[in-house]
Image (tube, helix red, strand yellow):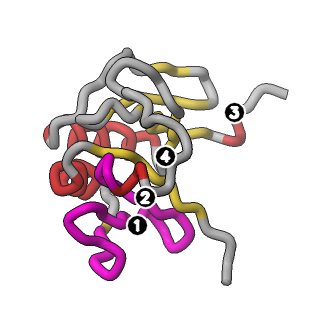
Amino acid sequence: MPKQIFINLAVHDPQKSLEFYTALGFVNNPQFSDDSGKCMVWSEHIYLMLLSHEKFSCFATKPIADTKKFVAALLSLAMEKPEDIDLLMERGLAAGGIEPSERKDYGFMQQRTIEDSDGHTWEIFYMDMGKIPG
């Protein structure tokens, strides 16, 4: 089996979250989805599990963080081209996401931030490896 990553997020409404992440370009895998959780595919090695609080609690050993008030993690999605950042952000904002901060330009990397309806924070970025300072 190849190395894969499954990111598990506690969400209040798995269906609403499915719609948001579909707008960002994730694809639902119905084989691993039901009313309490949605499996979303970013690539053949990267999966996002959107789990209701009840289902998430079955796996967690600590209380679920209130990601509307506290940052639990910064998750990042790399884009192939700089213009892909704005396309993804437009779709995410139209699907109910919010942009909590202004665009950042580090010279070698451009970045925008979007939060889903549960407050999970995603950094959408493009990095030009040829422009990284020596």
Image position of 1 (left or right of 100): right
Which residue reaches farthest right?
A: 134
The x, y position of residue 46, in whole percent, is: 52, 63
Crowd band around label 3 with a 10 angstrom C-alpha radius: few (<14), some (14–19), many (20+): few
Q: CA distance from mark 1 to mark 3?
A: 30 Å
**What amino acid is found at the position of numbered circle 4 in the picture?**
Leu
User: Residue 48 bears which disc, if any?
Assistant: 2
The quarter holding residue 86 reads: top left
The x, y position of residue 65, in whole percent, is: 43, 30
| Dot placed on the residue nearer the N-terminal end, 1 or 3 | 1
Q: Which residues are magenta?
A: 28-54
- Label 2 vs label 1, nearer the camera: 2
- Label 3 vs label 2, nearer the camera: 2
| Dot placed on the residue nearer the N-terminal end, 2 or 1 | 1
The x, y position of residue 95, in whole percent, is: 16, 43
Residue pointed to by mark 1: 41
Crowd band around label 1 with a 10 angstrom C-alpha radius: few (<14), some (14–19), many (20+): some
**Tag 3 near tag 2, CB within 8 Å:** no
Residue pointed to by mark 3: 131
Which one is in front, 73 or 128? 73
119 vs 128: above or below = above
Residue depicted at 24% across the width and 50% down the height: 17
Question: Which quarter of the image is occupied by the C terminus?
Answer: top right
- Label 3 SS: helix
| Dot placed on the residue nearer the N-terminal end, 4 or 3 | 4
Crowd band around label 2 with a 10 angstrom C-alpha radius: few (<14), some (14–19), many (20+): some
Which one is in front, 122 or 69? 69
